[in-house]
Image (spheres, grey):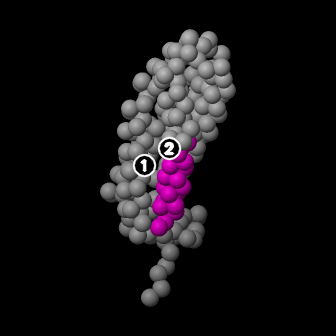
Amino acid sequence: MKIRTAQAITVVLFALVMGVFWGTWFSLSRTMNQLSAQAFVAVGHQMIQNLGVPMAILLPIALLSALVTLALLWPGRTAAFWWLLAGFLLMTAALAITLAVEVPIDNQIQDWTAATLPADWRSIQTRWELFHTIRTFISIAAVAAVTISLVVAARPNEPEINEVGPQGRAVAARRSA
C-alpha cells in the first residue's frame, strides 16, 4: 500500500510541475513574440515573480518523491520501477533545462525595463521559448511514464496470469515444486 501511495503522490507532483509548464506554454508562451517590448517586460516580470519560488520548491519535491518511490520499488525492479525511473530521468532533464537555460535568461529579464532592453532581446526571448517548449514536452513524457508506472504496478498477493483457460478466462500460473 505504501508503494502505491508513493507512486500516486509522485504522479500528482509531476502533474503539477507539468501543468505549470504546459499552462504557460499553451496560454502565453506561444504568443510572447507578438508582445510589444513594454508588454513583454511586464509579463516576463510577473511570470518570474509568480512562478520562481513555487517552482523552486515544487520541482525538487517532485523529484524527491520519485526518488523515495524508486527506493521502495528497487527490490523487485519490476516494470513499474523502470517506468518510474524513465519519468524521473525525464523530469531531471526538464530541471536541467530550467537551470542551464531558462533561469539564466529569467535573471536577465528581471533586470530589463522597456527602455533598457538589449538590442537582441527578441533572439533571447526566442531561445527561452524554444527551450521552454522542449521542457514542456519532456515534462509531459515524464508524467506519462510515472503514470504508466502506477498502472503497471503489480498487485500484491495476486497470482501471475500467463494463460487463458476455457471461455476466455484468465488462469493463474501453475507453480512447480
Which quarter of the picture shows residue 12? top left
Residue at the extreme left of the image, as rendered: 2
SS at badge 2 = helix
Which one is in front, 118 or 132? 118
From this view, report whether residue 158 is shown above or below residue 65: below
Q: Nearer the viewer's eye, disc 1 or disc 2?
A: 2
- Packing grade of label 2 (10 A; few <14, some 14-19, many >=20) is some
Residue 49, percent from left and from top: 42, 24
Residue 117, percent from left and from top: 58, 18
Mark drawn on residue 71: none
Residue 118, percent from left and from top: 61, 20
Q: Amino acid at mark 1?
A: Leu
Residue at the extreme bottom of the image, as rendered: 177
The answer to whether residue 143 shows anywhere in this view is: no
Q: Which residues are magenta?
A: 77-97
| Residue in the picture at 60% in, 31% down | 128
| Residue in the picture at 50% in, 49% down | 92
Q: Amino acid at mark 2?
A: Leu
| Residue in the picture at 41% in, 70% down | 75
- Packing grade of label 1 (10 A; few <14, some 14-19, many >=20) is many
Magenta stretch holds residue 169? no
Which one is in front, 128 or 109? 109
Give the labeled residue for mark 2: 95
Give the labeled residue for mark 1: 63
Image check: 61 left or right of 110?
left
